[in-house]
Amino acid sequence: MNSPLPGDYIDIHTHDSRPVPGVFAVENIMAHENRDPATISAPVFTTGIHPWHLDRNNSGALLAYIRGIASSPNLIAFGEAGFDKLRGPSHEIQLAVFAEQVKIAGEFGKPLVIHCVKAWNELQEAHRDLKPETPWLVHGFRGKKDLALQLIKRGMYISFWFDFVVRPESSGLLKSLPPERMFLETDGADADIRDIYEKVSADLGLSVDKLKEQISANYRGLFIKKRML
């Protein structure tokens, strides 16, 4: 089963997931982990080169790993990939490897999951210059409304940082964004995706079931529809 069932909670980005009834988890495999996708318990996964674990000497091996599993039927997207000004190699190295992952995502017709820390201008410049063929999903978002709308205007989707989205101050942001561009995640933390849905549904004035339907539709539109074309 590599698609969510009606009524599932979708955890769009997690690590080392464990099966939970009614929760459809998307496992992220970082290339430096060199894991065999057959060993994960989640029904689907993404894979990419995280900037924290990148340097000038290992980029070739990491890209080879991604290409080696790129044809897996349970791979729904590439990434997380992106930019981090607080940790990782120089921007030049991050950009070069990021551009390669954008290229691979285009070749296989799958979205790219984005990691971005204090490099939003660089991310938007990369989107403009690289002209990606597939959509981007920004994971772990905890920024301002204006930034979120800029990303959405570029056709991106947003998954909210699990700790940020349950705070009261996130409510205004959630209400201001189009729900068809929204996802929720745990990022492998000690958080329950069901609790996150409860809080977000209250913010949006929706029932949990309606929020499930919306995010399930978002999932189908981003991941399944494109594979069927």
Image (spheres, helix red, strand yellow):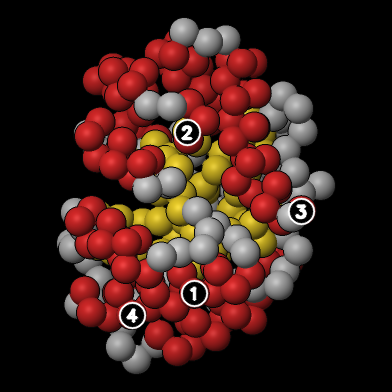
Q: Residue at x 70, y 47 (%)?
A: 225
From the image, tell me which residue sits under label 3: 228
Residue toward you, 133 or 108: 133
The residues bearing labels 3 and 1 have C-alpha atoms spaced at a distance of 20 Å
Residue 170, by quadrant, is top left
From the image, tell me which residue sits under label 1: 103
Q: Residues within 10 Å of mark 1 (few under 14, many from 20)?
A: some
Q: Is residue 184 visible?
A: no
Q: Quick one: SS at disc 3?
A: helix
How far across and how far down the image is residue 209, in percent? 64, 16
Q: Is residue 89 left or right of residue 49?
A: left
Mark 4 residue type: Ala
State which mark lies toward you, 2 or 1. Answer: 1
Residue toward you, 23 or 113: 113
Residue toward you, 188 or 204: 204
From the image, tell me which residue sits under label 2: 182
Sequence-first disc among 2 and 1: 1
Classify 106 as above or below 27. Answer: below
The residues bearing labels 4 and 2 have C-alpha atoms spaced at a distance of 28 Å
Sequence-first disc among 3 and 4: 4
Sequence-first disc among 3 and 1: 1
Mark 1 residue type: Lys
